């Protein structure tokens, strides 16, 4: 099944590529690797503001990470033209705006990782990952995630 068919089956429509909020580009390709800049969580088109362990619970953070995965897929599609060109999701790095006592960053990040697995399947979608708790994220967002993918050779 194609990635587009999986997305349709999941009821997911990819957004257009996001316009950077500062001095960077949304993605850079070198060789067969595509590096996606960090994407912050958005809700209703605005930054999804909150701090895990204070104003947000793990499940809401997981939903925010899933929303980021959809935005990342939109950027990845813009970068490669067709998501079926993705040979492997290589790495996901997640920053979770959280209190010093919150310890479930890995569970929040599962929102992104699980969707990537659903969309690309267990081989292409399985990836290395890091999840960090941080004191703050730009615009007060609850989660920021970046991604590295390998494309199939032309």
Image (spheres, rainbow, N blue to C red):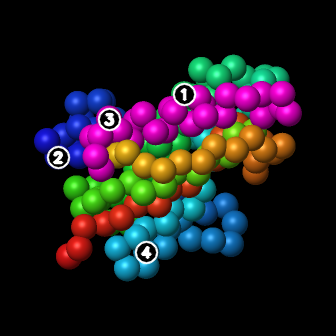
Who comes first in sequence, dot 3 or dot 4?
4
In this view, 53 is above or below 17: above
Mark 2, residue position? 2
Mark 3, residue position? 118
What residue is shown at x 63% (from left), y 43% (from top)?
131
Mark 1, residue position? 63
Mark 4, residue position? 29
Q: Which residues are magenta?
A: 98-124
Q: Disc 1 versus disc 4: distance between alpha carbons?
A: 28 Å
The one of 142 and 45 positioned closer to us in this rendering: 142
Q: Disc 3 versus disc 1: distance between alpha carbons?
A: 15 Å
What residue is shown at x 48% (from left), y 50% (from top)?
128
Q: Disc 4 versus disc 2: distance between alpha carbons?
A: 23 Å
Tag 2's secondary structure?
Answer: loop
Who comes first in sequence, dot 3 or dot 1?
1
Who comes first in sequence, dot 1 or dot 4?
4
Who comes first in sequence, dot 1 or dot 2?
2
Badge 1: few (under 14), some or many (20 or more) residues near its Cα, within 10 Å? some
Image location of residue 104, percent across then percent down: 67, 28
Who comes first in sequence, dot 4 or dot 2?
2
Badge 4: few (under 14), some or many (20 or more) residues near its Cα, within 10 Å? some
């Amino acid at each position: 099944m194609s990635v587009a068919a999986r997305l349709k089956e999941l009821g997911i429509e990819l957004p257009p590529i996001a316009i950077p909020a500062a001095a960077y580009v949304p993605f850079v390709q070198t060789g067969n690797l595509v590096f996606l800049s960090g994407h912050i969580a958005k809700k209703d088109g605005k930054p999804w503001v909150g701090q895990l362990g204070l104003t947000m619970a793990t499940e809401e953070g997981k939903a925010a990470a899933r929303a980021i995965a959809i935005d990342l897929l939109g950027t990845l599609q813009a970068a490669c033209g067709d998501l079926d060109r993705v040979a492997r999701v290589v790495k996901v790095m997640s920053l979770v705006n959280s209190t010093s006592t919150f310890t479930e960053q890995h569970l929040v990040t599962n929102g992104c990782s699980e969707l990537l697995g659903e969309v690309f399947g267990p081989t292409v979608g399985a990836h290395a990952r890091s999840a960090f708790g941080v004191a703050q994220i730009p615009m007060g967002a609850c989660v920021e995630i970046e991604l590295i993918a390998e494309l199939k050779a032309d």
